[in-house]
Image: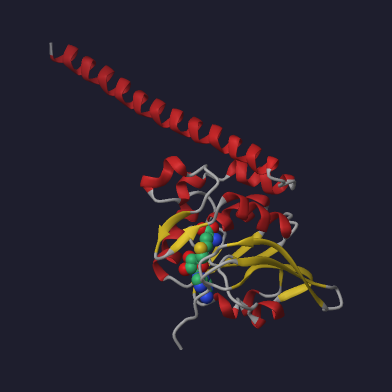
Amino acid sequence: MALLRTFAWAVGTVLTVSAAAHAQDSTEARFQERRLALVDLLRRHGIRDSATLGAIRQVPRHEFVPAGLREGAYEDRPLPIGHRATISQPYIVAIMTETIRPHPGMRVLEVGTGSGYQAAVLRAIGCRVWTIEIVLELADSARARLQQLGFGDIEVRHGDGYLGWPDAAPFDAILVTAAADSIPPALLEQLAPGGRLVMPVGDPGGIQFLELVEKSPAGRLSRRRLEPVQFVPLQRAEP
Ligand code: SAH
């Protein structure tokens, strides 16, 4: 009798564990399907770069948003992540990524880690990534999340990205994911010859334009306006 009970318990346990695994699988499959639909939408909206689209297809955006907002993770809109920060709209992540012409081995600095999603997209392409976040809690949680998702070789630093990351410079590309009315001079200095910087420039409380700065091999800077965007302001650390 005791043996039979043990057997029944064992069967019950196996069934419960496999049901849980199945539920997990179907959730993952559902998110993966939505990711494919999102990539289709981005393509229809003009994103062409296959490395960028491939990375967005691969990185689980639902792991970068608060638990209660996961179901909306593959809609093309920004979502709040606390501390007055937002994870950018997928289209904006795509445009910024595509604009730097990403490729494996490229050295990229991101200012404004937030959730860590943009950094993960760059890493998924094969870029080497340094990212700075001014809010300590966001830097710590992004570092832990990236580690857990297999992106542990992204360097996450807590600090003021206005000053860049001098000891890892120069960078082939710099992405600033917070807005200011001008481009921080340290970032222009830390951009390698032939490098590209993309950043929202304009009224930090209102509408800004994404701007692309290119540094020629001879070190000359040229600027181009891309499209209107709305980012959270670039803050400055207390002196
Ligand atoms: N790239 C992020 C979204 C960024 S939201 C993602 O993929 O989720 C903008 C982020 O910039 C916020 O987290 C904000 O705290 C941070 N930030 C603002 N000013 C900063 C500064 N001077 N240096 C570094 N990070 C800054």
User: What residue appears at the point 63 percent right and 55 percent down from the top-left corner?
Assistant: 122
User: What residue appears at the point 64 percent right and 78 percent down from the top-left corner?
Assistant: 182
Q: Is residue 13 above or below residue 122?
A: above
Residue placed farthest to the left in the image? 1
Please tell me in which quadrant of the rendered image residue 93 appears: bottom right
Please provide percent x and percent y for residue 24. Answer: 41, 32
Please tell me in which quadrant of the rendered image residue 85 appears: bottom left
Q: Is residue 19 above or below residue 148?
A: above
Please provide percent x and percent y for residue 30. Answer: 49, 31
Residue placed farthest to the bottom in the image? 239
Q: Is residue 232 above or below residue 94?
A: below
Please provide percent x and percent y for residue 197. Answer: 70, 68
User: What residue appears at the point 31 percent right and 22 percent down from the top-left corner?
Assistant: 14
Can residue 3 be seen here? The reply is yes
Can residue 174 be seen here? The reply is no
How many tags in the picture?
0
The answer to which of 118 and 169 lies nearer the viewer is 118
Please provide percent x and percent y for residue 23. Answer: 39, 28
Way the structure is coloured = secondary structure
User: What residue appears at the point 87 percent right and 78 percent down from the top-left corner?
Assistant: 218
